[in-house]
Image (tube, rainbow, N blue to C red):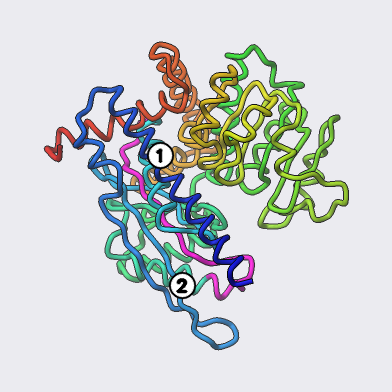
Amino acid sequence: MVADNAADSTKDTNKKMDVLSSTRTVVKTALEKLGYPDEVFELLKDPIRMMTVRIPVRMDDGSIKVFTGYRAQHNDAVGPTKGGVRFHPDVTEKEVKALSIWMSLKAGIVDLPYGGGKGGIICDPREMSFRELEGLSRGYVRAISQIVGPTKDIPAPDVFTNSQIMAWMMDEYSRIDEFNSPGFITGKPIVLGGSHGRESATAKGVTICINEAAKKKGIDVKGARVVVQGFGNAGSFLSKFLHDAGAKVVGISDAYGALYDPEGLDIDYLLDRRDSFGTVTKLFNNTISNKDLLELDCDILVPAAVENQITGENADKIKASIVVEAANGPTTMEGTRILSERGILLVPDVLASAGGVTVSYFEWVQNNQGYYWTEEEIDKKLHEIMVKSFNSIYNTAETRRVDMRLAAYMIGVRKMAEASRFRGWV
């Protein structure tokens, strides 16, 4: 049993290494296409700052458990770094590094005054009590308090974290800072300075990208068959938005399996039955595997779960005309190549999921100025930014004859590279 666990652990580590390695490869290619010298890549291939922390938490049984956490700050040439904090048993240092680079790219794509940051704690929140999660959240902020703040690095929700966890973190930072600091963190409850539309922002951004991609492919979203892998925050909101728009959501999944109905699933019923972690398939007997879900006959496929789902092994079996990445890194480099060669329109994660950081930026701006916008204003601003960004990347891909991922990286990395150049760093 120990040997099996060790093998699984090695496999997980290699997968995270591949994510970081493939990210660096695309960044390097993008910089070369733009004509930047090698020293720019040397600067941008890793975070400028990486902190590892140890967080002691008194558990409900009276014992002390020490958790490991990370905070990566990729590049702050443009402005303060920005990015989520995930609570997950599979968090690794390499994953956090890769995700911080993606956050820099997202900020560049939607033209925000940020660099990328990312944090994570190795834990399983599904097995922790409310009180234990509060202790862990506050302990993490105490551990990283020297390198974060409204003008340094602004955290946000990510996998298995939510507005309550952001509220605890903000409260802890305000105690340390001895000043009420709502702009320290985004994704907060509305009553503590949160923004309307933040919780559903990632899914709204993905939905906008789906609509724009469908126009390019001549597909009417109303009546289109859609498969959504993942039913967490992004996947569930996305399924609801598409269902309400008249699309036929024929497949959804969670960590335990997938549901399929060629006539369309009852999304409202599933949303009502899902738990706080997005689990719903346990309630059904006739489930299929996540692998089979990806290969279903559909018009639009949305990987909204975890990394490395579409690979060189299954990319030739994908039947969708459009693949829109709501998750981080769901398609490998080989998978991307195969989909592009087959004429499938792949909308990359750094564009599709940029709605979250965009509305986080709106929240930060509102906190800084003490004036708050309506949800209608937020949605209008988000729509304008996402459509502009989509068209910019699509046109770059067409004129440069590259895939959408490389085009997105080219646009995302340029602002950061230029800011670093003007500062005299390279």
Please rate how many residues cluster around mark 2, counting C-alpha atoms within 10 Å: few if below 14, some from 14 to 19, many from 20. Answer: some
Q: On the rendered structure, is 282 left or right of 24?
A: right
Q: Nearer the viewer, residue 316 or 158?
A: 316
Q: Residue at x 27, y 55 (%)?
A: 49
Q: Secondary structure at mark 1?
A: helix
Residue where numbered disc 2 is placed: 67
Q: Three-letter amino acid code at disc 1?
A: Thr
Q: Residue at x 45, y 27 (%)?
A: 385
Question: x and y percent of residue 28 in the render?
Answer: 32, 33
Per the model, the C-alpha gap separating discs 1 and 2 is 27 Å
Q: On the rendered structure, is 32 left or right of 162?
A: left
Quarter holding residue 369: top left
Q: On the rendered structure, is 246 left or right of 14?
A: right
On screen, 282 above or below 387?
A: below
Residue where numbered disc 1 is placed: 23
Quarter holding residue 211: top right
Residue 421 on the magenta span: no
Q: Residue at x 62, y 38 (%)?
A: 303
Q: Nearer the viewer, residue 219 or 297?
A: 297
- The magenta span reads 111-133
Q: Residue at x 50, y 53 (%)?
A: 157
On screen, 11 above or below 127?
A: above
Q: Residue furthest left?
A: 424
Which part of the image, by quadrant, shows the C terminus? top left
Which numbered mark, 1 or 2, is in the foreground of this view? Answer: 1
Question: x and y percent of residue 248 in the render?
Answer: 77, 28
- Label located before the other in sequence (1 or 2): 1
Question: x and y percent of residue 363 in the render?
Answer: 43, 45
